[in-house]
Amino acid sequence: MEELNVLFLGGGKRVSLAEYFINKGKDKGFKVNIYSYELTNQVPISSVAEVIVGLKWDDNSILDHLSNIVKDNKIKIILSFVDQAIEIASKLKEKVKHTFIPCCNQNMCQIMYDKKMAYEWFNINNIPTPKTFNQITNHFPYILKPRKGSASKGIVILYNKEELKKINDIHAYVIQEYISNKTEYTVDCYVSSNNDIISIVPRVRLEVAGGEVVNTLTCRNERIIELSKIILQTGNFKGPITIQFIKNNDINELYVMEINPRLGGGVIASIEAGADVVSFIIEDYMGLPLVYMDQWQENLLMTRYFKEVFFICK
């Protein structure tokens, strides 16, 4: 059986997804071996993958280090799982050209990692977003989002001027209206190497812990699907894409919050619903033709639980 070595960049907790790759690969005649690039080998993914302890994402030597890892381990596919690794993957694409790295170009990755630049891109392309401000006035509350934050880390909700005094550098944030009566959606998408949209699956974010969804429900929301198509085509996105939407329930308006050009943490729900992005990635790597997949199960509820992995620490 032919071996297919897959490198996760920051796979961390993505044990279930690694298991999907192993099982789906077997169905297609591959023995899939998962590697994961981490800062420590004491991470859950080590239960199913070979962990490679590497450098921080902002280390100047990381591209050379990863290039050597790709060569030494005969890596065939590389996937990002954390926002900081997205741009790294796009740069690596130019250095290891015989490795399949389904991701956007470097410019788009840079734009989407910086929330201020992303908002400007949304605005230029007439994509609806929550009201965004250059400064704080008396129209509280506001939500402050770190320009380069991820997983909801560092988000601040301001209710009055007294709370504003605790903010050291307001310019490090994007300032937006705070929508209290809201519904949040995640959309799992895949765009092939030939720029064809293969799947778009919206799901409601019912419960989130630590910035990651723990309860989510697939939903066939045509407004979200059509707007997602426009976004994917406008940005010339490629590979797995995660789009975050928010609906202001008071006025029934839908906005884009952010776009992450990578696999989302809850993509397992869309895979189980029938939009099998793992198979899409493997088939795209193989050069097989992919067609738009719309026959996925709506109202599929995914709920998560914790499972432990143990290490002996010296």
Image (tube, rainbow, N blue to C red):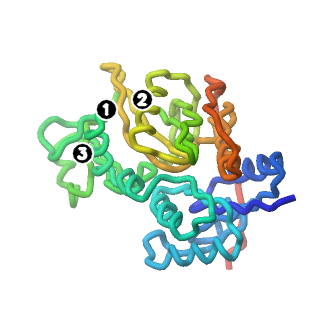
Q: Tag 1: residue type?
A: Pro
The residue depicted at 44 percent of the width and 55 percent of the height is 105
Label 2 to label 3, Cα distance in Å? 24 Å
Label 3 to label 1, Cα distance in Å? 16 Å
The reply to whether callout 2 and callout 1 are in contact (CB within 8 Å) is yes
Q: Which label is found at residue 227?
A: 2
Whole-percent x and y of residue 250? 32, 20
Whole-percent x and y of residue 265? 57, 46
Vertical placement of 6 versus 201: above or below? below
Which tag is nearer the camera, tag 2 or tag 1?
A: 2
Residue 184 is left or right of residue 122, and the answer is: right
Look at the image and tell me whether residue 43 can be seen. yes
Vertical placement of 159 versus 88: above or below? above
Q: Which of 119 and 70 is in front in this view?
A: 70
**Residue under label 1:** 128
The residue depicted at 48 percent of the width and 79 percent of the height is 61
Label 2 to label 1, Cα distance in Å? 9 Å
Say which quadrant the C terminus sits in.
bottom right
The residue depicted at 56 percent of the width and 77 percent of the height is 65
The residue depicted at 55 percent of the width and 57 percent of the height is 80
Q: Tag 3: residue type?
A: Ile
Whole-percent x and y of residue 255? 35, 31
Q: Which of marks 2 and 3 is nearer the N terminus?
A: 3
Q: Which label is found at residue 175?
A: 3
Would you call the spot at circle 1 few (<14 residues within 10 Å), some (14-19), or many (20 or more)? some
